[in-house]
Image (cartoon, rainbow, N blue to C red):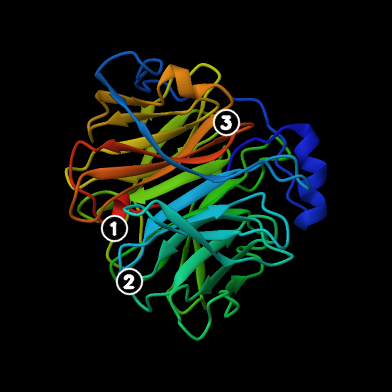
């Protein structure tokens, strides 16, 4: 999730008390690596438009696409964070035919990410507004409207409610959630939370974070990469086999100007794809923090597009699909990734 215009905050509050006022940055840790502004270092990858998925909603005054993730049959699922009741909140895209269809809508949720569980195969969504993680089966022929919505986790974690943003699954189906708590207050109250695959136990793995946003495992499932929206940094958190952690460290400092660090994906070679809120672009780094490339929407098409929120790389292939939004609407763009896609490069 990312900072939204004040006009939209009141509208979203009516949809589900989703208040995402921005907050100021704080001084970074000593020794952090400055990665350079978008476009500096590495090569430029030009993304090409696939199709427009949404228009600005009259009721909310905006549209914001997130969480692209591939299902088992190759369908690409995308969420629209600001869609009102009656408009598609989960959309299924056939990228080959360039067609789309609505999967789910409701009158409550503000869904900021989507990921398929390796444990039960259901599609999991984070509801930022209500502090919940829910799931549905989007490919059930007996449930074409996605009404089989189940609450997987709800309530406080260590005495405080969550604002869950992005999801990463480990190989056993346990969830790792970026909790963006503190964003509206301008305080570093964000966390990384582990929820076991049965939804019964939640554990805080890291706290004191500045609007935690993107989260993804590295290629070997040894640790988590996560970004902090209002600090423009990416940190690394080693994770043991049973969810235990050792000390985290700041790995990359993203000098993005007006752009801020949004969601993260990781390809088969361990490269990080850091989405940028405030610019329709992504920064690509290797695991050592070297800037490899910048993914950009062509200048002629960038007008009216404000953010590239997330990306999904085709499992086993290199075709990447990026969600881009702004006053011009919500779009799907494609580019060639630097390595093949895996579960860590599949939305979240």
Q: Residues within 10 Å of mark 1 (few under 14, many from 20)?
A: many
Left or right, 168 with respect to 9, comes to: left
Q: Secondary structure at mark 1?
A: helix
Circle number at residue 118 = 2
Name the one closer to the observer, 28 or 326: 326
User: Which quadrant of the structure image shows residue 321?
Assistant: top left
Circle number at residue 230 = 3
Which residue position holds label 1?
343
* Label whose residue precedes the other's in the sequence (3 or 2): 2
Between the residue at mark 1 and the residue at mark 3, the CA separation in whole angstroms equals 27 Å
Q: Outermost residue toward the bottom?
A: 142
Q: Secondary structure at mark 2?
A: loop
Count of numbered labels shown in the rendering: 3
Residue 248 x/y as whole percent: 38, 43
**At 46% across and 82% down in the image, what residue appears?**
141
Of the two numbered discs 1 and 3 in the rendering, the one whose residue sits closer to the viewer: 1
Left or right, 229 with respect to 252, comes to: right
* Label whose residue precedes the other's in the sequence (1 or 2): 2
**At 79% across and 48% down in the image, what residue appears?**
59
Residue 38 x/y as whole percent: 40, 18
* Label whose residue precedes the other's in the sequence (1 or 3): 3
Compared to residue 294, the image places residue 286 above or below, namely below
**At 64% across and 35% down in the image, what residue appears?**
3
Name the one closer to the observer, 279 or 140: 140
Work out whether residue 80 can be spotted: yes
Work out whether residue 177 can be spotted: no
Labelled pair 1, 2 in contact (Cβ < 8 Å)? yes
Circle number at residue 301 = none
The quadrant the C terminus occupies is bottom left
Left or right, 177 with respect to 70, comes to: right
Between the residue at mark 3 and the residue at mark 2, the CA separation in whole angstroms equals 31 Å
Name the one closer to the observer, 98 or 71: 98
């Amino acid at each position: 999730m990312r900072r939204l215009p004040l006009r939209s905050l009141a509208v979203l509050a009516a949809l589900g008390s989703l208040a995402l006022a921005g907050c100021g940055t704080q001084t970074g840790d000593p020794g952090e690596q400055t990665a350079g502004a978008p476009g500096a270092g590495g090569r430029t990858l030009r993304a090409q438009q696939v199709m427009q998925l949404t228009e600005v909603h009259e009721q909310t005054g905006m549209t914001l696409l997130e969480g692209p993730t591939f299902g088992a049959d190759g369908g690409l699922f995308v969420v629209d964070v600001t869609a009102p009741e009656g408009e598609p909140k989960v959309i299924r895209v056939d990228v080959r035919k360039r067609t789309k269809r609505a999967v789910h809508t409701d009158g409550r949720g503000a869904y900021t990410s989507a990921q398929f569980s390796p444990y039960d195969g259901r599609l999991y969504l984070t509801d930022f507004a209500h502090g919940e993680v829910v799931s549905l089966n989007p490919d059930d022929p007996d449930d074409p409207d996605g009404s089989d919505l189940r609450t997987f986790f709800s309530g406080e974690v260590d005495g405080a409610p969550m604002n869950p943003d992005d999801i990463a699954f480990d190989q056993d189906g346990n969830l790792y959630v970026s909790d963006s708590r503190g964003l509206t207050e301008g305080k570093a109250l964000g966390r990384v939370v582990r929820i076991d695959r049965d939804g019964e136990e939640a554990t805080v793995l890291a706290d004191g974070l500045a609007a935690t946003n993107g989260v993804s495992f590295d290629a070997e499932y040894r640790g988590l990469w996560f970004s902090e929206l209002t600090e423009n940094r990416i940190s690394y958190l080693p994770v043991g086999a049973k969810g235990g952690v050792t000390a985290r460290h700041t790995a990359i400092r993203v000098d993005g100007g007006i752009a801020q660090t949004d969601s993260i994906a990781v390809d088969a070679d361990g490269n990080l794809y850091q989405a940028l809120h405030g610019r329709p672009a992504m920064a690509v780094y290797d695991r050592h923090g070297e800037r490899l490339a910048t993914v950009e929407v062509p200048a002629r098409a960038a007008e009216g597009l404000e953010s590239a929120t997330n990306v999904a790389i085709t499992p086993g292939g290199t075709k990447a699909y990026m969600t881009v939004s702004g006053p011009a609407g919500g779009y799907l763009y494609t580019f060639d990734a630097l390595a093949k896609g895996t579960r860590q490069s599949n939305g979240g």
